[in-house]
Amino acid sequence: MNVASTDWNAWVPIALALPLVSFVVSFWMGPRYGWLVPLMATALLLAGWVCTTVILVDHSAGTSHFAVPWFSLGTDVIPIGWWLSPRSVTMLWVVYTISLLVHVYSIGYMAGEGGIARYFAWLGFFTFAMGGLVVSSNLLVTFCCWELVGLSSYRLIGHWHQQPAAGAAATKAFLVNRLGDIGLLVALMLLWSRAGTLDMPALTAMALSEETKTAVGLCVLLALAGKSAQFPLLHWLPDAMAGPTPVSALIHAATMVAAGVYLFVQLHFLFSADALAVAAVVGLLTLFVGGWGALTQFDVKKILAYSTISQLGLMVAGVALASPEAGFAHLFTHAFFKAGLFLGAGALIHAVSRHGHAPQQDIRHMGGLWQSHRLVLVCFAVCAASLAGMPLTSGFLSKEGLLLHVRHHSFYFGVMATASFVTTLYSARMVFYLLSPTPQAAATHPVPAIMQLPLFVLSVGSLFIGLSASPLSIQSWWPVFDAIESAPWVMVVSLAVLVVGVGVAWRLYRHRPTATLHARWVPQTWLDAAQKHIAVTPALQASRLTHHADRRWLDGVLHAASYGYVTCSFVIGWVDRVLIDGWVTTVTHAAKGGGKLFRSLVNGKIQSYLAWGMLALLSFMVWMLYQLAHR
Amino acid sequence: MIATHHIFILSALLLSVGVFMLLTKRNAILILMGLELILNAANLNLIAFNQRYADALAGEAMAVFVIVLAVCEAAVGVAIILQAYRHYATAVPDQISELKDPA
Amino acid sequence: MGLLLLVVPVRFQSVFRMAALVVGVAQLILFALLLASFDASQPWHGLEQAAWFSIDLGTWGKLQASYLVAVDGLSVGLVGLSVLVLLLAVVSSWHVQENIKGYWSLLLILNGSIIGSFCALDLLLFYVFFEFMLIPMYFLIGIWGGPRREYASIKFFLYTLAGSIFILMGIILVYLSYQDPTQPAVAHTFNILHITNPLQLLIDSPLYTADATLGSYRGWTFLLFFLGFAIKLPAVPLHTWLPDAHVEAPTAISVILAALLLKIGGYGLLRFVYPVLPDAAQHFSPWVAGVGLLSIIYGAMNALASKDLKRLVAYSSVSHMGFVLLGLASGTSEGVGGAVYQMISHGLISAMLFLLVGVLYDRTHDRQISHYSGLAERMKPFTAFVLIAFFASMGIPGFSGFIGEVMIFLGAFRAAELGIFGLWIAITATTGLLLGAAYYLWTIQRMFFGPFHSRAGEHNLVPLTTREYVMLLPLAVATILLGVFPQLLLHYINPFVQAFLVSFSSLTD
């Protein structure tokens, strides 16, 4: 395999290196200059963002590929490098933009928290890994970054590791992701064994059999289900909200969870029709489960988490059914409005929470902020509108794009339209609660300007101008999105869905019902139960079984063998002592007895010696006389 | 002239007395004296046998030898007894049992 | 070349820790010199040969063996690992209290025999070094070990001795089948260079058969060797000596045991078993892969159930050595290279893990996972090292464990594609990664997250000392370095793997 080494672009390594430098330096400076870390990390990221902007401007069209050998396996060489296309460049820019905004926001949000250096370090590391994932030209390197974003997500979810819930959520997130990672690993290995390369440019040019494509596609689907929280691996994401809110915005809304979709878009060519059909089903299922979940929650972050799940499902279904570009467009707009929603939610939580208490995240207790936090609420509402797909927002456009693509399949079109209705419903519900004039009981805190700024930027990005020059159709200034001919009836349908959705929400939630749904209605409850019964408990039981086997059976056999051996040796020892040694012992005993007898004669008395001597002489003489007499 | 067999009887008696002394006396000196008696019994036999051969003096000569030997023996024996007495502060052989196995 | 000193350090004197340290540093320097003159394109380096003994057996020919040592791409990495780990073991046992003289001299004997067996190119010499490791190990566990040390040391000794017997039988069969080319028809040979050369195979000798299946001599010889080395490796179900030996052994000895002794199992298979019996190896490769798979899953399962931190780490070793077998069984350049890489990487990582367990044990004399919680709060640098070691062991990219495992998987899947063993083996093996993550993350969650609690009290939890930093830092740096720049090591491994596969394929064709 030849390593193509073509287009060197110095901005790419610099852009990737800066967050990594931030990671290292943050840890280095952490103990002594903790106060400096947020500023330094943000400055480094700003520089990185400038680099990505330059790359974005440079790469308006075409692809460029650069690779150097990373390591060699026998005669094969695994290269490391980048593969820039309009899509990857755009994604890189989005990652850095959101990351920069989150950095800025975090300066305010995390002020006074412990472990700031650690927090910013891992933010930087995440940005590096995510950037690497986006631009890498080799799937093995992509896989590395894929795992590393999971690692940084793990560290950031568990940032407040003193809280047991955060630790458990981090573990859960990592393990579920790891399951997906294994899918990706298997996909890579299948590609390696069948295609002989993991280089994306080479793979695009390769014709693979349908069977391979199905297998690889399903494995990648598992991977993206883990990372992008698709059914049935979605239950980690609501738990992941135990991390700091800016982290949720960056990782668990805008970028990392979108990495699965991004990979799907990138590897779309590796999917067979069958695999795509499965992906579509998974995506649509997720879409509904997420939407339903969002309706059941009162915790603002969890609502947003379920909303993210639902939107990711929409993207996956969109990529599978419509086109990769349409799905990617939604990913792009989602990144902005969802990050905006999270940052807005974070600002509101900041406003109503009292220091030293658990953060107040319940939308039933977050109303009445209109007077004091007008800008935050407006920005939040704009982003929510984008989520719901209001006209004039970017969400409207990207959703429109998806619907346009599937307009000829009445079933899929109907499902997506219904899903849009659900999305509208929960978005409106959330906004109604938050905008309600009910007075806030607790004193509120002002939101610092440094937190409002990113929020404002993101809400502007959520308007149509973030995606397109025209408010009605995608006529993008982004090179990556194709202009699509709009069909008026599609727009009418989506508007009708929107109106009905808002209307129903108004009817249902105008009076702010506070009853909590029973836990059994929350998707997470039964997914957690499924996880427990299908995976965790059997694994633990199996592990106890093997442990038992190890201690009892394997060691038992060993011990039985050794006891048997020792017993045998005792038996043999007895035989040896009693039977074989027996006659030897008898002889020695006889000798000993004789010796004792004779020794008693030797009593040390000369006269007894003499007497014996005389006796002997006498008997000798008697014998001689006897002999003579019988001659 | 005394009959030879009478002399033999005397000699046997003398030997018996000597052996008896040798075996029963507790004092080493008396044991030594018993030994002298045995030697004298032997001398008596030598002389008695010589009666038969009047022209030969071998028996008497042998007896003289034995007497000399007995003197030497008595001298050495007494010396040993004296030394033993000095060492063990006793002349009773039963109390000197170092030859015996200690067990 | 000072390899002689490398192999036979100053031993049987009353050496104390200073002497041990000096030897360790000297070895490190010698190794650096060796590395500087190492040319990866040449097969053997620092070859030293001296006749050891030669007995004339009349019409039977001659029984002879020689002192023949050298390093190549396979052993250079392992020798380097040994030198580093042995030096760190010296550092870590700096405060051994009882019977200092015995401890240090045994440690040095162990040192010599480990490096010796990695360098030996004469089967008999290898066997002698191999056996010689047992004795100091036995005493080191049996005298300086934990409460059940007698049980553990005897179990270790008997198990390994049983393995040695199998190996000895195999060695004799191999010896009888190969001739010394310098004295043909007169002498058989123990020389690995000769026995790996099929031209020296004697006609009508036991191994002279095309049949490599179960009943044949070749099959039997392979099985004998495999059994012997599988005990050492260890492979399930011959592994039960390992957890006990590890749990009872003092820290430095656990480190040596896990990082070096286990590697000799894989090393022996790679050094001569596979090259001498490639056909048998190929015939049995589904079984070897199956044993590897069983070790991976079974070891991980047991680690998940372990309550003692050290036992957990010990079982994780079983699991990771299963990967070595899987890579070996694949018989592909990725898989074999990955097996070598995994051995070295596991050497570094397991050394670090055991040192970390030792660090905690030194402070509290308590290794029960459930007795701790929230350690991340109190012992930040310690936690950082633990996280590095755990993540490295889990196979997170950026650490050497990842490269080894990925290479092994690449090889395993390619082997499955070539029909060497079933695809299901390769796919099931990947779940080992999930289980690995599960037991480590669960441990982190239980021991390091949450509110602080330690049953042994908190006053014991003093910060890491300089000595402990000196032990842990090189290992952490080495793991990361090998994870980011795998070519550093693959540069040496690749030529070996090429040569290995050439001999492999030339015989099977």
Image (cartoon, coloured by chain):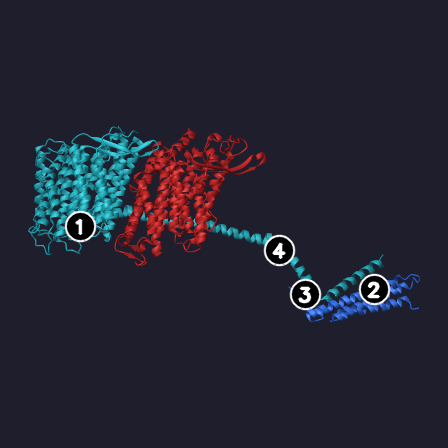
Q: Are marks 3 and 4 on the same chain?
A: no
Report whether C162 appears left or right of A18: right
A441 left or right, relative to C189: left
Q: CA distance from mark 3 to mark 2?
A: 31 Å
- The residue singled out by tag 3 in the image is B98
Q: Secondary structure at mark 4?
A: helix
Which colour represents chain C? red
Total marks shown come to 4
Q: Using the numbered discs, state the Cα–Cα distance from disc 3 to disc 1 in whole angstroms.
A: 104 Å
What is the C-alpha distance between the residues marked 2 and 4?
53 Å
The quarter of the picture where residue C269 lies is: top left
Q: Which residue is mark 4?
A: A585
Q: Nearer the viewer, mark 3 or mark 4?
A: 3
Q: Quadrant of the N terminus of chain C?
A: top left
Q: Depth-wise, is mark 2 or mark 4 nearer the camera?
A: 2
* Chain displayed in cyan: A
Image coordinates of residue B99 in percent, x first then y, are: 69, 64
Chain of the residue on which disc 3 is drawn? B
Q: Position of residue C295 (x, y in %)?
A: 37, 43
Residue C76: horizontal and vertical position, in percent? 39, 39
Residue A235 appears in the figure: no
Q: Which element type, helix, strand or loop, lies under badge 1? A: loop
Q: Which mark is residue B66?
A: 2
- Crowding near the residue tagged with mark 3, few <14, some 14–19, many ≥20 C-alpha atoms within 10 Å: few
Tell me which amino acid carries mark 4.
Thr
